[in-house]
Amino acid sequence: MIQYSFLSLVLSSTLLFSASLGEEQAIQKGSAVAGTLVQKLGGELINQMQTSEAMGALHFCSQNAQVLTDQVGKESDTQVKRVSLKNRNPINGASSEEKVILNGWEKLQNSGKPLPSHEIKANGQYTYYKPILINNDVCLKCHGEIATDSPLAKEILSTYPEDKAVGYKIGDLRGMIVVTFPR
């Protein structure tokens, strides 16, 4: 009886460790994929801002951001998307589950508490969530306070008639990267 209980304890501990290790690997994978997207998209946007200013960045985003996001997903064998409560492109609107997470993060931020670096959920698959913060003045060129009669504002409205992605300040929660992959 004692041997059986000990064996059960060892097997249970091993299964718990395996589950934890699997989640840790999932966190590493989600973090790596999100980091790749931030690096590729951010690098291109910085390049566009340097060469063509905000108008060039806007055109790049409207034509290439989703393609680049999908490319990162294909290269990493995951599904990747960027979502927000205040999306510019309707395809980047948050699902009801994503809204719950984003609203929770906004409450944390509004109460002065730090945001988590990520969240992960496991429901038959892993879903990794990483906050996107406005952390650079360059972001504010297109997402900050923009004069409504400026050529940039007119172009944003022309390209994205339902745009909600303005009025941000440094440190604001812009949205999140969502990475989904099999367990």
Image: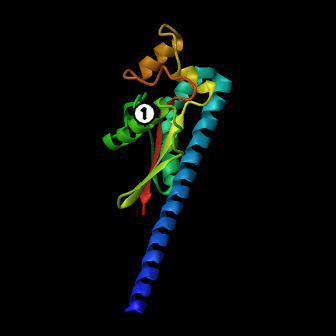
Side of 33 relative to 12 (left or right): right
Residue 139 at x, y percent in the picture: 58, 26
- Say which element carries label 1: helix
Q: Residue furthest right?
A: 50
Q: Count the marks: how many?
A: 1
Residue 181 position (above or below residue 54):
below
Amino acid found under the numbered disc labelled 1 = Lys
Task: Give the residue at the far left of this rendering.
Answer: 96
| Residue beneath the point at 44% across and 33% down | 106
Q: Which x, y percent locates residue 102?
A: 41, 37
Residue 57 at what x, y percent from top left? 57, 26
The image quarter in which residue 60 lies? top right
Quarter in which the C terminus is drawn: bottom left
Q: Quadrant of the N terminus?
A: bottom left
User: Splitting the image into 4 quarters, where does residue 99 fall?
Assistant: top left
38 on left or right of 157:
right
Apparent side of residue 72 relative to residue 11 in the rendered image (left or right): right
Hey, which residue is sitting farthest front in the picture?
A: 2
Q: Residue at x 57, y 52 (%)?
A: 32
Using the image as rendered, state which of residue 43 and residue 133 is in the foreground: 133
- Residue 53 position in % (x across, y down): 63, 21
Identify the residue at horizontal 46%, vertical 36% (top origin). Answer: 108
Q: Nearer the viewer, residue 86 or 56?
A: 86
- The residue identified by callout 1 is 107
For the view shown, which residue lies furthest in the top direction? Answer: 149
Q: Is residue 43 above or below residue 36?
A: above
Q: How is the image coloured?
A: rainbow
Tell me the crowding category of disc 1: few under 14, some 14 to 19, or many 20 or more residues within 10 angstroms, Cα based: few
